[in-house]
Image (tube, rainbow, N blue to C red):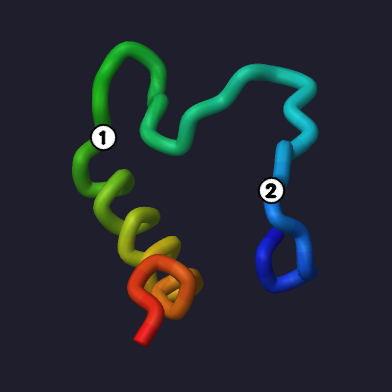
Amino acid sequence: FQRAGYLIGIPNQSNLWCIHYNGDEFDADTYEKNRKVFVEQYKDILSPS
């Protein structure tokens, strides 16, 4: 959202979701994989120089 010039963003969610929800069990490997993708994509916003 910041890259598009917005100060805040509220994603449209027709169903509630959470990236690490995988049924009844927490999938740590998939969560970590997706966390790394997120951090790489937004590292300039998360840790500005």
Q: Is residue 12 left or right of residue 41?
A: right
- Quadrant in which the N terminus appears: bottom right
SS for callout 2: loop
- Kind of residue indicated by mark 1: Asp
**Position of residue 15 measured from the top left corner of the image (x, y, whole percent):** 70, 19
Residue 8 marker:
2
What's the CA distance linking mark 1 and mark 2?
29 Å
Q: Position of residue 23 (x, y in %)?
A: 40, 17
* Quarter holding residue 12: top right
- The residue where tag 1 is placed is 27
At 43% across and 62% down in the image, what residue appears? 38
Q: Nearer the viewer, residue 29 or 15?
A: 15
Label 1 Cα crowd, 10 Å radius (few <14 / some 14-19 / many 20+): few
View extreme (left): residue: 28
Element type at marker 1?
loop
First in residue order: circle 1 vs circle 2: 2
Residue at 70 percent of width and 55 percent of height: 7
User: For the residue marked with disc 2, what is the amino acid?
Assistant: Ile
Q: Quadrant of the C terminus?
A: bottom left
